[in-house]
């Protein structure tokens, strides 16, 4: 397991940043890592962040693990996940059921972030190192 997978798998919350006009918006969210370095999560179709994603699909997620290592994932977010992806997300992250009982819930939006740049850094003051994501 590489550093990317290790940090995402062992960090329950990532901080997702989006853009609302000229104002950055950050919120804690739960993510799962899937092949290709993609990150999956969920939200409600009535959430204010949906408008932000539709206006600008560029996002960044920052993870800080228990050892204070940081992982930053820049990417593009897709909100069009189908029932199969929703079903897979429910299996990968059973906590999603606290919000959506099944993949057919009308308010359930599957979020998929495809990384465009990934960097990490160890504890303490240091520069970020690039991580190559394999497709």
Image (spheres, rainbow, N blue to C red):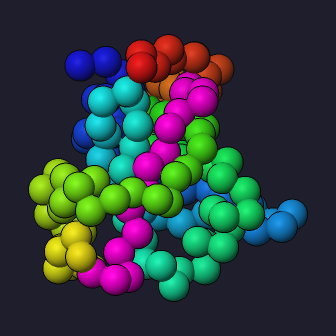
Q: Name the main secondary structure of what is drawn in magenta.
A: strand
Please say if 95 is above or below 15: below
**Residue 97 in view here:** yes
Nearest the eye: 8 or 57 = 57
Q: Which residue does the image show at 49% across and 60% down from the upper left?
A: 79
Where residue 43 appears, as percent x and y from the top left, is: 42, 71
Residue 95 lies within the magenta run: no
Q: How many marks?
A: 0
Q: Which residue does the image show at 47% across and 29% down from the upper left?
A: 123
Of all residues, the one furthest to the right in this rendering is 22
Picture quadrant where residue 52 is located: bottom right
Q: State which region is magenta.
A: 105-119
**Residue 89 in view here:** no
Please say if 128 is above or below 87: above
Where residue 132 appears, as percent x and y from the top left, is: 50, 14
Where residue 121 appears, as percent x and y from the top left, is: 52, 25
Where residue 100 appears, as percent x and y from the top left, is: 24, 78
Q: Which residue does the image show at 23% across and 55% down from the upper left?
A: 84
Q: Quadrant of the N terminus?
A: top left
Nearest the eye: 7 or 17 = 17
Q: Which residue does the image show at 35% across and 22% down from the upper left?
A: 3
Residue 112 lies within the magenta run: yes
Q: Quadrant of the C terminus?
A: top left
């Amino acid at each position: 397991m590489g550093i990317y997978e290790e940090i995402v798998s062992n960090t329950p919350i990532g901080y997702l940043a989006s853009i609302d006009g000229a104002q950055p918006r950050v919120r804690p969210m739960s993510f799962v890592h899937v092949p290709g370095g993609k990150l999956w999560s969920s939200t409600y179709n009535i959430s204010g962040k949906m408008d932000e994603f539709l206006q600008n699909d560029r996002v960044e997620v920052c993870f800080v693990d228990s050892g204070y290592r940081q992982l930053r994932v820049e990417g593009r977010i897709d909100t069009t996940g189908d029932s199969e992806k929703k079903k897979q997300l429910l299996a990968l992250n059973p906590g999603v059921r606290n919000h959506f009982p099944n993949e057919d819930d009308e308010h359930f939006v599957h979020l998929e972030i495809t990384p465009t740049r990934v960097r990490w850094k160890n504890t303490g003051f240091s520069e970020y190192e690039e991580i190559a994501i394999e497709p």
